[in-house]
Image (tube, grey):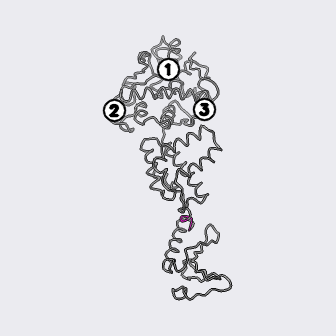
Amino acid sequence: MLTEKGISQAKPKEKLYRLSDNTGNGLSLEVSPEGGKRWRFRYRFRGKAKMISLGTYPLVSLKDARSKAIDAKKELESGVEPGTKKKAAQGAKTFQEVAKEWFGRFSATTTPRYSAEVWSRLERGVFPFIGNKPLTDIDAPTVLSVLRRTEDRGVIITTHKIKSHISQIFKYAIACGLAYADPSRDLSAALRSRASKPMPSIIEPKEVGKLMLAINEYTGPIVRSALLLGALTFVRPGELRTAEWTEFDMEASEWRIPAAKMKMKRPHIVPLSTQALEILSKLQSITGHSPYLFPSTRTTSRPMSDMTVNVALRALGYAQGEITGHGFRAMASSLLAEKGWSVDAIERQLAHVEGNKIRAAYHRSEHLEERRKMMQDWANYLNTLREQAGTPVSASAS
């Protein structure tokens, strides 16, 4: 075992040599031919023998060297290679600086649209809170607090996407020697599960565009109109198939669904976009003689079957596990949130109430002006995605 007296009396030799502390802590004193004395910590990491410096003697005393060796062993036990934390801390870059480096490489391998979506999520949900923090100062609780800001908005899928982006940035930093661990690695258990959506849906913009293009090419005008209106208004399937012409005020651009038809037994207003009004205008020339927008093929006195929309989606090549009529709601909720629309407006338009994160004080007309703008923006966005998927949009019902 090393002692202060033995260390001070250690003389240089022709070749470098080491004196072990013999305490099982991996510590040794390295004496150079010039007489310099440096503390070394020897260890194995991932099957390889390695060694790092813990400072020079007498600037670092025996007591301090042993303390540093103990700290290094603790890092090893936690799965962190000793010394990497110190290395990363020297001239540490901010999270945003490293994110820009990572994004430069990431964006070169993805489409411009997807790259823009990723960067937008970081700009809105991450940079304002930890963008200027040194990467080495960011721990798991800090990352969790950032993710909870998005989670508290009710945007669960986006929360997990942001977590994935943060993790990729830290993995890049580790590879570059700028960080020593990924603080987001074990946070999934502390977040709400994204597997909680009740019905299958399509939420990737590119795939939504393909879906809208496929719907636009559906041959039956009445069912095609139902599919288009389902996507544009994202009402519940039962509210869509039982829609009656008397519920629509074309001049006010509103669909007023009575309380008796609503799941929560409250009347509901659906602002109508110009695209929805165009579909309704052309559909009226086909089914205007019936009380229902979408009458049964057997009799105009009853609405179409509750299976019609899903059967049509299957005919378009979409499996039951990919999309259903109810899935238009999750599609709109997710993408509208990513576009920056408020949770209050989205939840109100989905006709959710207290149990679904909307205050009891909200009435059917609240957020209506914001919802009008949102519904038009949504219709325009679906048009854009459809055009990008292949052809210009034709909203015609005939």
Residue at position x 65%, y 44% from top? 108
Q: Which residues are magenta?
A: 82-86
User: For numbered disc 1, what is the local secondary structure?
Assistant: helix
Residue located beneath label 1 in the image: 274
**Viewer-side residue, 237 vs 113:** 113
Q: Is residue 67 above or below residue 271?
A: below
Badges 3 and 1: C-beta atoms under 8 Å apart?
A: no
Badges 1 and 2: C-beta atoms under 8 Å apart?
A: no
Mark with earlier residue (3, 2): 3
Tell whether position 85 is magenta: yes
Q: Is residue 85 above or below residue 237?
A: below
User: For numbered disc 3, what is the local secondary structure?
Assistant: loop
Q: Is residue 161 above or below residue 238?
A: below
- Outermost residue toward the right? 14
Kind of residue sitting beneath label 3 = Tyr
Classified by dominant secondary structure, the portion drawn in magenta counts as helix
Residue located beneath label 2 in the image: 362
